[in-house]
Image (cartoon, rainbow, N blue to C red):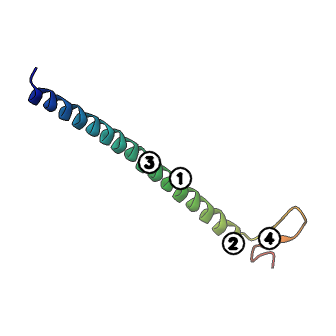
Amino acid sequence: MGSDCRMGLFVFKKLEDFLMTRKSTYEELGKEVKAVNKESTERRLVEEELNTVRAALNSAASGVIITDKKGRIKYANPAFI
């Protein structure tokens, strides 16, 4: 095998290693993007549910209060006040 052929194989192997590393990096990046999208979707759904509960509490005809463990009022809806 000639020197040029060995050099060509060496360069090819380095290129192959580089491309495999890049592929792995892109796959990992794709996984990260999917995870962020999933977290974003989950957060949006939780925020929508929180807004629904908040609207229900604010429009309830009965008084509602929420306290912490020490009995301090953290929330009181308009019907309570």
Q: Secondary structure at mark 2?
A: helix
Q: What is the distance, in whole Å, between disc 2 and disc 1 at their CAs?
A: 24 Å
Residue 58's disc number: 2
Q: Do the residues under discs 4 and 3 have CB atoms within 8 angstroms? A: no
Among numbered discs 4 and 2, the one appearing first in the sequence: 2
Q: Do the residues under discs 3 and 1 have CB atoms within 8 angstroms? A: no
Residue 32's disc number: 3
Among numbered discs 1 and 4, the one appearing first in the sequence: 1
**Comparing labels 3 and 1, the label whose residue is closer to the camera:** 3
| Frontmost residue, 37 versus 18 | 18
Instruction: From the viewer's perspective, tell me whether residue 46 is left or right of residue 12.
Output: right
At horizontal 57% and vertical 61% (from top left) the residue drawn is 47
Q: What is the distance, in whole Å, between disc 4 and disc 3 at their CAs?
A: 37 Å
Neighbours of disc 4 within 10 Å: few (<14), some (14-19), many (20+): few
| Frontmost residue, 73 versus 78 | 73
Q: What is the distance, in whole Å, between disc 3 and disc 1 at their CAs?
A: 15 Å
Q: Which residue is mark 1?
A: 42
